[in-house]
Image (spheres, grey):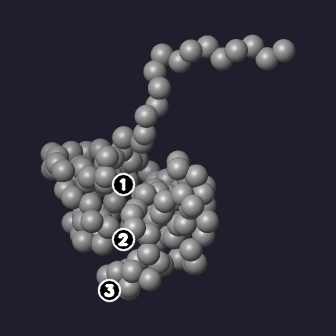
């Protein structure tokens, strides 16, 4: 017989923020702001940290040579990664518009639209990379 799970002390509501170590903060800000539409929420230049608003969540960028970034290892790349990928839920999901926008910014789209499982269920997604090689999944609504 399986014993019941104890009641947790809290419930997880959503991802609050993701922190990415980057080589060039301004180049990364330009990508997340100019290409993906995130807004700079707050800067902590003393730490080499920039908080970008991504819907109800944040994407934090930490410069690799700043006080926080020096605590990590290698930057994202073929030999090492900060994370596997970050998934951003977007709406509307229009493949043609996404591909056109990425092409205008010189951002390669990796592969075709896939039907992937996410927080809301199965739905369309497509992958791009930020200037540091971090994989970003752009995910549409559940079908």
Camera-side mark, 3 or 1: 3
Residue shown at the point (21%, 45%) measured from the top left: 47
User: Would you name the residue on which mark 3 appears?
Assistant: 104
On the rendered structure, is 4 left or right of 129?
Answer: right
Q: Earlier in the sequence, mark 2 or mark 1?
A: 1
Dot 2, how many residues are within 10 Å of its Cα: few (below 14), some (14-19), or many (20+)?
some
In the depicted structure, whether residue 58 falls above or below residue 136:
above
Give the vertical position of 100 relative to 41 (above or below). below
Q: Quadrant of the C terminus?
A: bottom right
**Relative to 34, does residue 143 appear above or below in the rendering?**
above
Residue 27 seen anywhere in this rendered image of the structure: no
Q: From the top left corner, tell me how far across and down residue 8 is, in percent.
A: 53, 18
Report if residue 18 is visible in the image: yes
**Which sits in the foreground, 91 or 25?**
91
Label 1 neighbourhood size at 10 Å, few (<14), some (14-19), many (20+)? many
Q: Position of residue 128 (x, y in %)?
A: 46, 72
> Left or right: 20 with respect to 118?
left
Mark 1 falls on what kind of element?
Answer: strand
Q: Is residue 4 left or right of residue 78?
A: right
Residue at the image point whose x is 38% and y is 85% from the top: 100
Residue designated by label 2: 131
Q: Which mark is residue 21?
A: 1
What's the CA distance linking mark 3 and mark 2?
15 Å
């Amino acid at each position: 017989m399986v014993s019941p799970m104890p009641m947790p002390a809290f419930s997880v509501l959503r991802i609050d923020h993701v922190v990415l170590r980057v080589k060039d903060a301004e180049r990364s800000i330009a990508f997340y702001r100019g290409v993906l539409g995130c807004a700079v929420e707050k800067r902590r230049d003393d730490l080499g940290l920039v908080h970008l608003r991504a819907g109800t969540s944040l994407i934090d960028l930490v410069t690799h040579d700043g006080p926080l970034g020096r605590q990590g290892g290698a930057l994202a790349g073929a030999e090492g990664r900060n994370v596997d990928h970050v998934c951003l839920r977007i709406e509307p999901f229009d493949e043609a518009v996404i591909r056109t926008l990425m092409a205008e910014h010189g951002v390669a789209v990796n592969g075709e639209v896939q039907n992937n499982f996410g927080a809301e269920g199965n739905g369309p997604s497509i992958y791009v990379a930020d200037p540091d090689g971090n994989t970003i999944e752009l995910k549409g609504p559940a079908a």
